[in-house]
Amino acid sequence: MSANNLCKRIIPCLDVANGRTVKGINFTGLRDMGDPIELGAAYEKQGADELVFLDITASHEKRSTMLEWVKDVAKNLSIPFTVGGGVNTIDDVQALLQAGADKVSVNTQAVKNPKLITDIKIKFGSQCCVVAIDAKRNSDGVAEVLIKGGRENTGMNAYDWATKCVELGAGEILLTSWDKDGTQSGFDLELVKYFSENLPVPIIASGGAKNSQSFVDVFKLAFADAALAATIFHDGSHTVGEIKNILNQEGVQVRIC
Amino acid sequence: MKTEIEVDLVNIDGGNKGSVLRLLERLNVSVNEVGFDNLPKGNRPLILPGVGAFGAVMQSIEKGGLSQCVSQLVKSGTPYLGICVGMQILFDGSEETPGVNGLGLVPGSVVRFLKGKVPQIGWNKLDNLQNNGYEPGYAYFVNSYYAVPTNSSDTLYSADYYERFCAAVQRDNITGFQFHPEKSGAFGQKLMQRWLFDVSK
């Protein structure tokens, strides 16, 4: 087989509330982490390949605030970025893409109205349609789909749902393990591997990143196409550059800036 | 005295002109938008960003005689930069939309990736086979199809996605980037500057 030099992607994720980057503390309070535009630019400098911004307060009333910071982020970033949170209609998608987002991620609304995925594909192309799947294993170990920020378990098999999303037009799957998220115990390698090996679109692994080894494992053992993390970048314990240097030493193809 | 660089940005349906515009703004380039109702005159270099299907882009550029106008200007020496599908339409045709002719300005055709996840999404490593000062680096791609120039000397950059493919093309006053320079960080910006420098000499 000929060479493949497509790089594995490292994607910092920023939660945004009312136009500020925030971090949840034990599900009770939100700590202000700074301006999303400045933080985004800092991650680009560190060597981030893409960024994901999730608006955790997104609602109809706050839509205009969201579009404002998306415009500012677009003006200042020269790497691709995805915006998610409260994307309910094709008009929401259009407004975000026009504001400068490269991709939009849909989650709860895609489960409630799967046609939204197809509408995005037809109007703007699969390449800008990321379907985010929050997966939690049941007592038999089968991953099921959670919606509404983890508050509701649909009982749907996560892999079946992902397969359907791809058929409907999803360009990428952002797979978050709710068993691993926030635990800093490494990615759910078994889950990520199954999705990566069997689905024809890129899988972005999320939930559980602890250190450089977590990334080495998720790429070398679970064949993820990209890996997303928040805490380990926000708390300053790791930079994207450090992780990429180790990946490079381990023979994983990454973009070295 | 500083001479300001000016370009004509060809505006077509579905083109991702927003991010290209933002890059040009960062580089202090003044942008004049042209389209089927405001044809370019050939007094400025042309940039054509394109996203979507080959056939749809061709259909959109054929409106109002725009494609004929662009072809004539390019043939008479106006510098042209095509991005993504804006590069693919330079060729004779594409497997994506059989039966639809491209602009035919660079000999060759456009074919689909056979292996790996398609579209290819992400950063790939560019190798420069020509000795022309364009540096190697990493660029951001989103593509299912790629061009195969008839003359290998037209290939500016190659990259590998389970097979070697043409990532950029250059022939006389014509340049095409399959990747997105506007999304390729500092490296993409440098490439854009290099092209602007070359065409405004």
Image: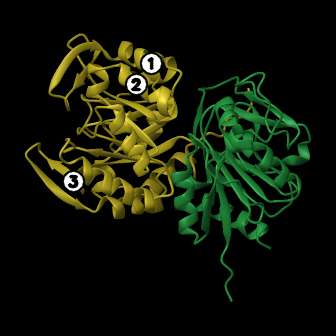
Chain colours: A yellow, B green
Toward the viewer: B135 or A117? A117
The type of residue carrying mark 3 is: Val
- The correct choice, above or below, for A178 with respect to B31 in the image is above
Instruction: Give the label, 3 or 2, closer to the camera.
Output: 2
* Chain at numbered mark 1: A
Residues behind callouts 1 and 2 on a single chain: yes
Mark pair 3, 2: CA separation: 28 Å
Element type at mark 2: helix
At label 1, the amino acid type is Leu
- Nearer to us of marks 3 and 1 is 1
Q: Which residue is the site of mark 2?
A: A117
| Cα gap from disc 3 to disc 1, whole angstroms | 33 Å
Q: Secondary structure at mark 1?
A: helix
Q: Position of residue A73 (x, y in %)?
A: 39, 57
Q: Is residue A60 left or right of residue B51?
A: left
| Tag 2 subunit | A
Amino acid type assigned to the residue bearing label 2 in the image: Ile
Q: Are marks 1 and 2 in contact (CB under 8 Å)?
A: yes
Q: CA distance from mark 1 to mark 2?
A: 6 Å
- Viewer-nearest residue: A79 or B61: B61
Residue occupying image coordinates x 30% and y 20%: A113
In the rendered image, residue B84, in percent from the top left (x then y), is placed at 66, 43
Badge 3 or badge 2: first in the primary sequence: 3
How would you rate the neighbour count of disc 1 (Cα within 10 Å): few for under 14, some for 14-19, many for 20 or more? some
- Quadrant where the C terminus of chain A sits is bottom right
Residue situated furthest top in the rendering:
A140
Residue A168, numbered label: 1
Question: Which dot marks residue B97?
Answer: none
Identify the residue shown where x is 47% and y is 22%: A169
